[in-house]
Amino acid sequence: MIALSDYLILSAIVFCIGLAGIFINRTNIIMLLMCVELILAAVNTNFIAFSYYSSDVAGQIFVFFILTVAAAEVAIGLAILTLMYRNRGSIDVDVTNSLKG
Amino acid sequence: MLENYLPIIVFIFLGIAFGVGLTLVGYLLGPSKPDEEKNSQFECGFPAFEDSRMHFNVRYYLVAILFILFDLEVAFFIPWAVVQSKLGWFGFIGMSVFLLLLVVGFIFEWKKGALEWE
Amino acid sequence: MMDYQFNTADLFFALPELFMIAAIALILLLDLFVSERFQNLTYYLTQSTLAITGYFAFNLIGESAVIFDGTYVLDTIGSYFKVFMMVFSIVALVYSRHYLRAHNLLKGEYFILSLLSVLGMMVMVSAHSMLTIYLGLEIMSLSLYTLIAIARDRAVAVEAALKYFVLGAIASGLLLYGMSMIYGITGSLDIGQIAAFATGANLNSEQVLILNFGLVFLVIGIAFKFGAVPFHMWVPDVYQGAPTSVTMFLSTVPKFAATAMLVRLLIDGLGGLQAYWADLFIILAILSIGLGSLVALMQTNIKRLLAYSTISHIGFILLGFITGVVEGYGAATFYVLAYVLMSLTAFGIIIALNKQGFEADQIVDFRGLSKHSPWFALLMLFVMLSMAGVPPFIGFYSKLFILQQVVSAGYIYLAVAAVVFAVISAYYYLQIIKTMYFDDAEKEITVTAPLDMRIILSINGALILVLGLMPSYWMELAISLF
């Protein structure tokens, strides 16, 4: 039987990969979006594991909502991305530093 | 411990067998008369054979964005449908309101011309 | 199987939100089908929606109920916050219209997105479950990202939207991770049950450890939304890049929602761990006040300067929550109110200087304002003195109340540091006053703001002085909310 801690370790690893990806990879915005998705996947794993082991269905409902919100988030991210492409002809973060900081 | 994974292994083998088997059957038994029409682009609008790392037309993003939204919102209907008979009028009206809001969004994107290709 | 029984009477308590969502759907459709000639229709409908929603929220003051299976709460602080949010949104939209006209951005979507973000804030304010908090937060944030990108031809605006989006998405991810931990240990999403668990006497050290682990992520998420150092990276860029009217909206109304989120999660929910999160807040607060005061000295762009000034004000607000007493929370809420009033006026005046096709966002644009438009220069003088903390303006009392509470809670070194940085920050506020009154304008400044904006801006500026003359009523009100 797989223990609760196994799921938590898995989700912690996925979470750290997502977070590290954001800080290491600063050039491609699509990659940033994928890293954010990884973080959300880690959160979902956590919620489902907790929900299963405490036999409380609320956590799974939360995951449902996270999934839909994440879709909306990605949609807006892609929309901003296409605007950026239209303005600059490039989607690299490197060239988008007219705002310092 | 490991015997928990047995169904997964069976599943993998079944998957491989089905995939390879059906392709093989099609390859051996099916008639093969390729011509210009059959090898040309179909539905998705791309040439059938080319490098997979290519540029997409930016308009595909718009379709993707709209698809992803409605796709996942509609996913809310599945758990609702499972228990619909127990929820009664409360569930029905609640879901109707949800659907109504979704339709408002749909009318908006339609009228704004997001569904037009040109 | 849950035995949830839906009660139609519950809908009455959620009337402001329900009215608003219905109105948004209606306005969205009307805006689509009504011809160009009635371009103002969307604007007026939006303003009436906000006014009517505010009226409903006002009528519900004093009622309290937990509805919808414990996911939604109606209480005094929620109702008051909603009324304030509606009033300030109306003011912000009056100012916005002048800016949008001047830069050809006047579209129906602008107002609909504003309404949607306000709806998200209302959900956050009334949330009684981590799920509702998250949903409200996302409705608000997603609308705000889009609102920034509404100036789609401006590269800086799109870039600001992207930065806000990426950092906001990371912040929600961290917040969610914290929520999942809290859910795991308490076994519930309900704020009331989390509070019951966290204040329970028989917690073992492992449970406290996991709660704290989740708590750190929650605090990071909240700090991101507030824009407290070291999670402030988005604030200056977004403030500078976004269209000024969006910057104004962003810097004012959502602060109420962020405060409400803090209250719901950390005070209502994890109030039992106050000693733990107060330690984190000390670091956030002192860094925010310090960095906000020092970096602002070097800015030439007024929007960027106000961004750093906001960061330092956020530091003061967080100081109020460190104290852990009701008076401290009240002082922080009073500070939010004072800050929103000042910020609205400051951005209102910046917007008033905008003309057709002219973007006023540099400090040098204020040169010689006192000669060409003495009244607006006077209002700006009020704001700057108030932000610097000069009596008798409201900004002085808000700082005073916070410092009083911080000292009486025993953090004398924090109060001393805050005062030192406040004195430093006075330098750049006075710099702007000097620019307005003693520098000569290179070109003629004509203020083309319409009459309704002038009237409301004047009232808004005057309130900074008037409320400063009678702060005790508002302070008592703020304390009574907790």
Image (spheres, coloured by chain):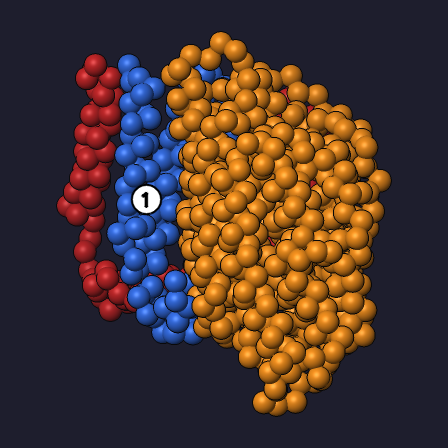
Chain colours: A blue, B red, C orange
What residue do we see at 52% from left, 11% from top? C201
C288 or C9, nearer to the observer: C288
What residue do we see at 55% from left, 32% from top? C410
Q: Which residue is mark 1?
A: A19
Instruction: Name which quarter of the figure residue B33 lies in.
Output: bottom left
Q: Is residue C131 visible?
A: no
User: In the rendered image, which quarter contains the C terminus of chain A?
Assistant: bottom left
Label 1 CA crowd tier, 10 Å (few <14, some 14–19, many 20+): some
Number of numbered markers: 1
Q: Furthest residue to the top?
A: C202
Position of residue C455 measured from the top left corner of the image (x, y, whole percent): 81, 69
User: In the rendered image, which quarter contains the N terminus of chain A?
Assistant: top left
Position of residue C274 measured from the top left corner of the image (x, y, whole percent): 53, 27
The answer to whether B11 appears left or right of C66 in the picture is left
C139 or C211, nearer to the observer: C211
Q: Chain of mark 1?
A: A
**As displayed, is residue C453 above or below residue C370?**
above
Q: Is residue C197 visible?
A: yes
Position of residue C238 measured from the top left corner of the image (x, y, whole percent): 49, 62
The answer to whether A37 appears left or right of B50 in the picture is right
C369 or C169, nearer to the observer: C369
Q: Amino acid at mark 1?
A: Leu
What residue do we see at 18% from left, 33% from top? B17
Position of residue C65 measured from the top left corner of the image (x, y, whole percent): 74, 27
What residue do we see at 41% from left, 48% from top? C230
**As displayed, is residue C13 above or below residue C122?**
above
